[in-house]
Amino acid sequence: MFEHVLSVMIFLPIVAGLILLLTPAGKGLARLTGLVISFASLILGLDIFFKFKEQAALQFVENVPWIPSFGINYHLGLDGISLFVLLAGAVLMPMVYLLFTTKEKGYYANLLIVQGAMAGALCAADMVLFYIFWEIMLLPIFFMLGMYGGEKRIKATLKITIYTIAGSLLMLASIVYVGVTYHSQFGEWNFAISQMSQLQLAGPVAVLAFFGFMIAFAIKIPLFPFHTWLPDAYTEAPTATTFVLSAIMAKIGVYAVIRFVVPVFDGEFARFALLLAYSGVIGMMYCGITAIAQKDVKRMLAFSSASHMGVIALGVFCLNVQALTGSIYQIVAHATSTGVLFLFVGILEDKMKTRKIEDLGGIAYKAPVFAFFFAIAMLASVGLPGTSGFIGEFLIILGAIKFNVLIGVLAGTTLIIGVCYMLWMFQRVFYETTNERTEGFTDLSITEGLTFLPVIVLIVIMGLYPQPFLSKIEPAAQQHIAALTKADTIQIAQSTHAQPVEGHTVEKKN
């Protein structure tokens, strides 16, 4: 593959989306453009995956000076962590254009822009470059939610806007602090992530900068108690927007913690790891219990998604290779299961004109293929052995128990809540008696079935044969955990009952 493959994956969708916005193209041409470009990104993503070497270093690197006077570079690269989030987006985005064909031109244009910006955030190896793509990827979401959402879209848009702007400002202030500190310590400007790990950060200002990053990323994940924007946004957003928010964008929040917080604020991260882990567990419990009470299928899935994101975030906070590997694996598993469930609910709403559980029933009798595919995605979401969700959750729980037994037990038992509300919803929607609404429900068309089939197969493959994926994740996971097993970090971690992985060289920062 050519040298600038990452730049193509980033800017091809962005440029195409801008052209669509500025030209009088119809919605048919806009959808076709999005479909072609998303398939092109998928081909590039698969080529990257098969050529990716099982090592920790960044690969497919592009590094060009951009603003040399401040040490800001156009610096891109992938490792085993960013690879899988990027690949999840590449695999899933074509489904949006294949399944939903009635949106306006501006909607498809914004989808293209957010697709490219998310790829940019995942590939950026420079803090300033990451921040720019982070901001760009949020703008299309505001337009898609505010212009094409449900009846309460304005309230939901204002809420997510306030949250994300506050988080972005905190992150910007933290980036400035890190850059200024690097300049004071080394006599030059530099925002490369690989260089930031050399910083000696300590004191209350460093703690404030740490929380500036963490709050920004916790909002996006979302992590308790910064999750309150999610139910309204997920429920009121059009299906494709909810899909993007849940399946891909939330994962970038977790990825950003691993990429930017762990290497730079290793001491602070270890010191507050226990607090963050409890936040993840509380979010799992709260959102899981709240999901049980929901009468709207989409709103129930919104709380379910937030609960499972708490599981993924927990793995990052446990300071060992098993949990971190499980989190990265679970990112793809959650994207393919919960993301696909949102698409199924979108089809259900389009056909039934309702999302209320009490108005549905007996769909399995009318649409067995729809029910079968939905069941596989649902079982993967709750972590059934043999599906992709089991591997990631097992590794996370294993790592959580090594980190802190109480947290591991709470996390394991909390997963049972997800089984309860998912099976309860499935039984009522698919196996209750049919009514006048569901009597005419039709099964998936050939196009819809073929669109879902590859992802359903991927869910099973990842559940039965995870090694090809784990082998690409583990080197990067080991490198990040090794950065936390320095003498000073171990002391901090042990004082909070954290237990970093053994077997790495103990050394201080130079």
Image (spheres, grey):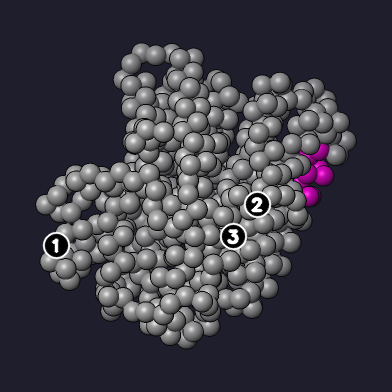
Q: Which residues are magenta?
A: 423-430
Q: Give the residue type that dot 3 points to.
A: Gly
Give the number of the disc on residue 188.
Answer: 1
Give the number of the disc on residue 217.
Answer: none
Q: Residues within 10 Å of mark 1 (few under 14, many from 20)?
A: some
Question: Taking the image as drawn, is residue 271 in sight?
Answer: no
| SS under mark 2 | loop
| SS under mark 1 | loop
Give the mark, 2 or 1, whose residue is nearer the N terminus: 1
Q: Which residue is mark 2?
A: 466
Residue 1, relative to residue 444: is it above or below? below
- Which of these two is toward me, 232 or 54? 54
Q: Residues within 10 Å of mark 2 (few under 14, many from 20)?
A: some
Position of the C terminus, as image quadrant, is bottom left
Q: Residue at x 53, y 60 (%)?
A: 474
- Which of these two is toward me, 233 or 80? 80
Q: Which residue is mark 3?
A: 326
Q: Residue at x 76, y 42 (%)?
A: 375
Q: Residue at x 73, y 38 (%)?
A: 374
Write down the quadrant of residue 444 in the picture: top right
- Measured from the top left, where is residue 195 in percent x and y? 27, 62
Q: Residue at x 16, y 59 (%)?
A: 189
Write down the quadrant of residue 133 in the picture: top left
**Label 2, label 1: how far apart the Cα atoms are:** 44 Å
Question: Taking the image as drawn, is residue 413 in sight?
Answer: yes
Q: Is residue 73 magenta?
A: no
